[in-house]
Amino acid sequence: MADIVGLLAAATALAGTPAQGASVERPVTVAAATQACVEATSPSGVDEARLGSAGWDGYDIGLGAENGMRVYNHGRGPIILAGIGTESRKSGCNVIAPLPADSSFETVVAALSSEFRAQPTGRKPDAVIWVMGDKGILLTLTGGKTRPAVRATVVQNAEGMK
């Protein structure tokens, strides 16, 4: 798990550094990427074929087979980081994106609530949770004040978490 946390931190740092003149993705794109994760997450893990059919291209990130992680992109914007095979049941499906300078965490929360057609079921200042059917989604504010970013983690709920 520590490897995943470190990997997520590195990916968030990369996602939080857009190239000079590059457009930073809007919150609705973060919402669409998170919805792709919701649709691809099942009791057996993250369905790579489903992400692929939705236009997400997967790439191995060279961490070795024991880490079993893959990064997905869909043009410019957020990236998806997910485990491969059974590893994806542990790590979930993670959307990582920089927070646009003219946006706020609350704007992303509103975009996700609109995409899900549901209000959060729990919240703190820098974390929001939605529990929808058999899925749980945790949105967190990451990256610090100089490079704020968001990470949305989608997992299959265990029995009793509903």
Image (tube, helix red, strand yellow):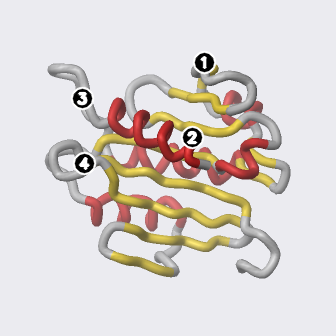
Inspect the image, locate mark 2, and give the three-letter code of the amino acid beneath it: Asp
The numbered dot on residue 148 is 4
The image shows residue 111, relative to residue 94, as above or below, that is: below
Mark 1–mark 3 distance (CA, rounded to whole Å):
27 Å
Q: Nearer the viewer, residue 154 or 64?
A: 64
Inspect the image, locate mark 1, and give the three-letter code of the amino acid beneath it: Gly
Mark 3–mark 4 distance (CA, rounded to whole Å):
15 Å
Q: Residues within 10 Å of mark 2 (few under 14, many from 20)?
A: few
Q: Relative to residue 19, is residue 32 drawn left or right?
A: right
Residue 70 image position (x, y, % from top left): 63, 29
Q: Nearer the viewer, residue 158 or 23?
A: 158
Q: Give the residue at mark 3.
A: 23
Marks 2 and 1, the one that precedes in the sequence: 2
Q: Give the residue at mark 2.
A: 3
Which mark is in front, 2 or 3? Answer: 2
Q: Residues within 10 Å of mark 4 (few under 14, many from 20)?
A: many
Which mark is in front, 2 or 4? Answer: 2
Which mark is in front, 1 or 4? Answer: 1
Inspect the image, locate mark 3, and give the three-letter code of the amino acid beneath it: Ser
Q: Quadrant of residue 105?
A: bottom left
